[in-house]
Amino acid sequence: MRLATLRHQGAERVGALTSGEEIALLPIACGDLVEIVQGGQEALSHLRTILPDLRERIPLEETSLLPPLRRFRRDILCAGWNYWDHFEEGRGRRDGQEVPRPEHPTFFTKSPDTVIGPRDPIAFDPKLSAKWDYEAELALVVGKTGRSIPAAKAMGHVFGFLLANDISQRDLQRVHGGQWLKGKSIDATMPIGPWIVTADELDWREVQLQCLVNGELRQDAPTKLMAFPLSVLIEELSFGMTLRAGDLLLTGTPAGVGNARTPPLFLQADDEVIVRGTGLGELRNRVLETNLHGEAGVN
């Protein structure tokens, strides 16, 4: 199933995309997508049963799509350097913060306040950062709570998949001790969506990720090139640490980011950024100049 969150007649609703490119609105009693995710296979079975009889339907092109997930119990979980070509393209460009190729996945988190919808404007403030970059990523939604999950059972804990654009401020990413939280957590900068594709309908290894800026193809790579496959990410991230149903995990970006180009190509106001993935739809967002710095005295 493809499950989306949308605004309809002034209210948030959850819908399922049909083969006719319509969205069938689910009964309000089904709850939001977080509740459906937490309901697991029982909730999905119920939706599949009632879907043919749902009569309230909207053409996809007329919908106002919201981020599929709107409630988060924790920061968004992320894997960095999970494509070796991306790790290698950054050599010599990390402002003196060079590291050897990691032997285990690299994890970090980012604020839920970064999240925007698949068609919303990306906030941009040149006074905050001079190096705004794009990162096309496959993201997954945890569907079953667990701790120290073995790799052999890891995919049984995945509810589904969606796209994310992990907009990053490279100078902020370097200046605060080399950790990534600050340079990845600026408000209203990360589109996700456009919907969640349930795990039974998508082979994550067969997704071709693409990012285009103003029509120019910047990133283009298959997810099978991940340095650490999803089962390993889940096993290592959950080692001694509980992952809960509804958690969102970004799984890394391939080569082609703006910071690694010669000369670097960073985002500017009014750029259009598109992220696509096989079977996952697309994110289409315009960069919008926004006052994010306020009256702060930070230089």
Image: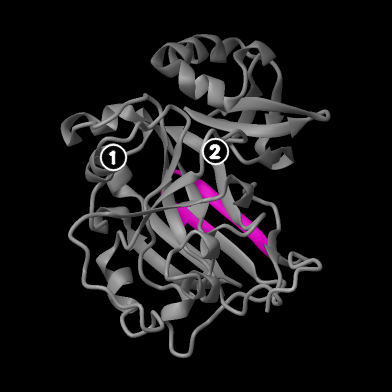
Q: Amino acid at mark 1?
A: Ile
The residues colored magenta run 275-286
Q: Determine the residue positioned at 60% across, 74% down.
A: 267
Q: Are marks 2 and 1 in contact (CB under 8 Å)?
A: no
Q: Name the disc covering residue 195, or none.
A: 2
Q: Examine the rendered structure and indicate whether residue 292 appears above or below residue 250.
A: below
How many marks do you count on the picture? 2
Residue 281 drawn in magenta: yes
Looking at the image, the residue that sits furthest to the bottom is 263
- Residue 276 showing in the rendered view: yes
Q: Determine the residue positioned at 59% across, 65% down.
A: 273
| Quadrant of residue 232 within the rendered picture | top left
Q: Examine the rendered structure and indicate whether residue 58 appears above or below residue 40.
A: below
- What residue would you read off at disc 1? 234
Q: Amino acid at mark 2?
A: Trp
Say left or right for 234 vs 273. left
Pick whichever, 135 or 103, lies toward us. 103
- Residue 167 showing in the rendered view: no
Q: Determine the residue positioned at 18% across, 32% down.
A: 150
Q: Whole-percent x and y of residue 103?
A: 17, 60
| Quadrant of residue 178 within the rendered picture | bottom left
Which of marks 1 and 2 precedes in the sequence? Answer: 2
